[in-house]
Image (spheres, helix red, strand yellow):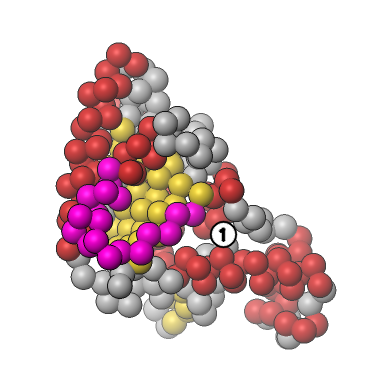
Amino acid sequence: MSKLLYITANPKNDIKLSKGMQIGEVFLEEFKKEQPDVDIEHMHLYSMDIPEIDMDLLYARAKLSFMGYTKEQLSEEERTKLEKMHTLADRFIDADYYVFVTPIWNLGAPAILKSFMDCLFIAGKTFTYSEHGAEGLLTGRKAIHIQTRGGIYSIGKMADFEMGDRYLSKALEFLGFDLMETIFAEGMDHFPKQIPEIMAKAKEQAAVAAREMAKLPVSL
């Protein structure tokens, strides 16, 4: 049985309030038509206890990586936060397909997404160093990003300012993922009267992408 991890980064934990989650729901429904037995796990980041890289985590990682400490020699606070980070990374790794749903806020993604991704960058677990430099270990996995945008970032003067999808895509690429083309619903603040058309187009794209992803083989 395959597993799909559905990751949402929006304080609106209600599909009626979140346009991104409405698009994401279409994706999930179409995916399940192709893979009825898929196991779908929803990670709603705003409902999770996600450790941030603070002084404890910064030093815990340094102590273990190049300062000669063992895990037992860490402080209780350092060890607790590090274990939370590894537990979250283990949950993340245990999937075949990944769907991220986020808005763009102030040119980037919600800060909680960055905190979440920080927990996944663990040398020896999700990436490694070789003579060729850093190499992602999460190969064979398929991922897609669904992003809602109030403005227009796909073309025009704002295109170079979009940092949310750009960051997430590069982070996943670094970790070894196979990425599908991002689905975005944009211009909803600029053109509120066109929201039904914008959403319909994005939902159609999500349905097509879901069918395509469901047919892609994974090789973990």
Question: Is residue 11 among the parts visible in the rendering?
Answer: yes
- Quarter the N terminus occupies: bottom left
Check disc 1 and report the residue beneath it: 118
The magenta segment is 26-43
Which residue is nearer to you in this view: 65 or 43? Answer: 43
Q: In which quarter of the image is residue 21?
A: top left
Circle 1: element type: helix
Residue 37 placement (x, y as % from top left): 27, 65
Q: In which quarter of the image is residue 66?
A: bottom right
Residue 161 placement (x, y as % from top left): 42, 35
Q: Is residue 195 left or right of residue 59?
A: left
Q: Which residue is drawn at 51% across and 49% down?
A: 44
Task: Say if the magenta span includes residue 39.
Answer: yes
Which residue is nearer to you in this view: 147 or 94? Answer: 94
Q: Quadrant of residue 82?
A: bottom right
Question: Is residue 181 among the parts visible in the rendering?
Answer: no
Task: Say if the magenta span includes residue 71.
Answer: no
Q: Is residue 8 left or right of residue 37?
A: right
Q: Which residue lies furthest to the front in this view?
A: 37
- Quarter the C terminus occupies: bottom left
Q: What residue type is labelled 1?
A: Asp
Residue 147 placement (x, y as % from top left): 37, 40
